[in-house]
Image (tube, rainbow, N blue to C red):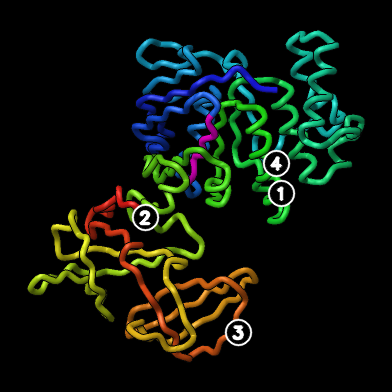
Amino acid sequence: MGFDMQAIKLTGIRKTFGHEVAVEKFDLTVNPGEFVTVLGPSGCGKSTILRIIAGLEEPDQGEVLLGERVVFSHEKGITVVPEDRDIGLIFQSYALWPHMTVARNITLALKNSKVPAVEIEERLENALKMVQLEGYGKRFPSELSGGQQQRVAVARLIAMQSPILLMDEPLSNLDAMLRTDMRSEMKRLHRKLNATTIYVTHDQVEALTLSDVVVIMNDGVVQQQATPYDIYHHPANLFVAEFIGDPRINMLPGGIRQENDSTYIDLGGFILPFQDVPVLKRKDVIVTIRPENIELSMSEKPDWLVMQLDTVQPMGSETIMQVSIGKILLTVTKSGFFHMDVGQSVWLKIDPAYFNFFDPETGINLNPNKKI
């Protein structure tokens, strides 16, 4: 089963609530069949964008196209009401009618739209099968777990056969283990349906695992729009670098120094030789490196940096450590579960090829197109 795929295009969107600017100069193009996640902290404007696409909020400026159809244009005076936009929408609360059975919750909108009874039954059966709830049609929401209620809400979207799906933090009410299971279900369903999907979340794991494209917002402004790989490895600015990643990225003030024919990076507590600096025509930078890109040894290694172990957090599949040298504090991860003594010496190998360099004043990545 697949939907007739449609693109989504937003141009120059601006939305205010009183004197507060919720969204500023927002542009977004979602290709047919893509899964795009809008990610950011609470209050950044991501849910407002979803409600604008759905027609639940009217922007102050800009234009919204669904497929070839203009559904909102401030300049042209066009506003299409939500029920005529042919979209499927799921909220954090699932919005199930408690007095209706699962089957009726899924098919109510179809009946109101005068879809033939035989087709309604076919859509219901298919939707329940796709969310693995066969045989649950006669149950009521109170008889279901949180995860099952979430599946019913997704089944309702599937049954509507809308070419565009909008999801506003649909997994945030679930416990951690169930969220992991449902992320896999969401990804599987999207492959089957090929519906153009915009998914709003504050959970970076959801964004990185589900998406074709991630849009990161802060204070109503897009910070970066890219693939999950580029968002993680090539953050556009310091906000993105710090927002993405758990444990957080290491951020160090540093400087590019040159002596004779050699170039090196001075990070305060230590220096590292570095040759490839074609875009770094400056002395002061902010250097970042992910914890997993630092190698750590518990035994002495020639030419490796010796540091002191400050904290140890065994997580099962990996161990998170904080190490220090002088006033420099670094977070490092190592695969596996390790028992280590705080205060002991450890040895680190830091490869500058994994560095990103940022302007200390603007926060902009100075070399966003690096290979790693």
At mark 3, the secondary structure is loop
Q: Amino acid at mark 3?
A: His
Q: Is residue 333 above or below residue 298?
A: above
Q: At which x and y percent is residue 285?
A: 23, 63
Q: Which residues lie in the magenta part?
A: 34-39
From the viewer's perspective, tell me whether residue 354 is left or right of residue 123. left
- Location of residue 133 with respect to 255 vertically, above or below: above
Camera-side mark, 2 or 4: 2
**Which amino acid lies under the numbered mark 4 shown in the image of this protein?**
Glu
The mark nearer the N terminus, 2 or 4, is 4
Marks 1 and 2, how far apart at CA: 30 Å
- Along the line of sight, the residue nearer the viewer: 197 or 348: 348
Task: State the predominant SS element of the stretch in magenta.
Answer: strand
Mark 3–mark 1 distance (CA, rounded to whole Å): 30 Å
Residue of label 1: 181
Q: Which residue is mark 4?
A: 185
